[in-house]
Amino acid sequence: MSWHTRRLAAFDIETTGIDVEHDRVVTAAVSIVGGGEPTASRSWLVDPGVEIPEGASAVHGITTAQARRDGQDPAEAIEQLTALLAAQQLAGVPIIAFNARFDLTILDREARRYGLVPLVDRIGGAERLLVVDPFVIDKQVDRYRRGRRTLTAVCEHHRVPLVDAHDANADALAAARVAWRMATSMIDIGGTELAELHRLQVGWAAEQAASLEEYFAAQGRPERVEGQWPCVAAPVLLHA
């Protein structure tokens, strides 16, 4: 039975910004879908404990005032979210996340910020992660397609409806639907065993980062592009 016909854990977060080392989770959603069973969804509105920049609020619609008034304690929310994803991973259910490097790295740093056990440690190490990332797969199988590779653009290309973009639950479900569409239409994706598909994505993500870095260099922009996927290892803190 192919991985896409079984249960999938669709995951997405919205944040205070795009710096994985310092920004915080504002909203999150996990929807366990597929496998012929009813969908089970959980969502969180989090008080990040810091101001939410206007630019971020313009994207996901959550203001600082709203998060402070209605948001859950961040440590409590991150514990619940991490525990839920860990339980799915230990049961062999893959996490489906669009641009998983961002979401899983932010989640990792949030767990460490609050003294919680991060996802990679709960499941026995990063090598035991099972993740499907439609962003990485789309860039690999259709690398020369012009245009943007946002979730909205990729959904449109694969004829997957996306309503309420940047709502965590809507984005999570859209990512799962894109992954399912890819798996049903491409035998090399749907027919590949899950652990092997994860391993392939590790390599693809590294190659994509190196290619983008080369492109930037050719444009006179010597920028480093992160190639580690799906969760960037936490920096090692050196003590005097």
Image (cartoon, rainbow, N blue to C red):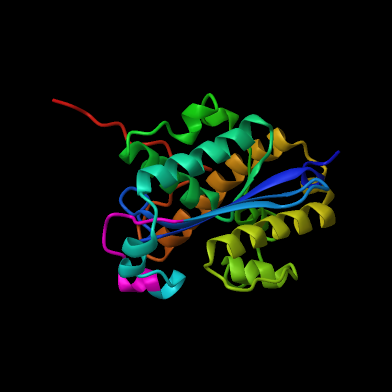
How far across and how far down the image is residue 37, in percent? 79, 47
Residue 153 vertical placement versus 90 (above, below) = below
Residue 161, given in percent of the width and then of the height, sits at 70, 71
Q: Is residue 54 magenta?
A: yes
Q: Is residue 110 above or below residue 124?
A: below
Hey, which residue is sitting farthest left in the picture?
240
Residue 228 is at least partly visible in this image: no
Instruction: Tell me which segment is drawn in magenta.
Output: 45-57
Q: Quadrant of the N terminus?
A: top right
Tell whether 142 sits left or right of 152. right
Whether 44 is among the magenta residues is no
Looking at this view, is 141 or 113 the one in front? 113
Q: Which residue: 49% across, 40% down? A: 82
Front position in the image: 138 or 12: 12
Residue 67 in the figure: left or right of residue 119: left
Residue at 38%, 71% (x, y): give it: 57
Which of the pair 229/81 is nearer the observer? 81
Q: Residue at x 37, y 69 (%)?
A: 56
Q: Position of residue 70 (x, y in %)?
A: 38, 62
The quadrant of the rendering that contains the C terminus is top left
**Residue 162, picture quadrant:** bottom right
List x then y, in percent, for residue 118. Answer: 44, 34
| Residue at position x 55%, y 28% in the image | 123
Q: Would you say the magenta stretch is mainly helix, strand or loop?
A: loop
Which quadrant of the view contains residue 52?
bottom left
Q: Is residue 82 visible?
A: yes
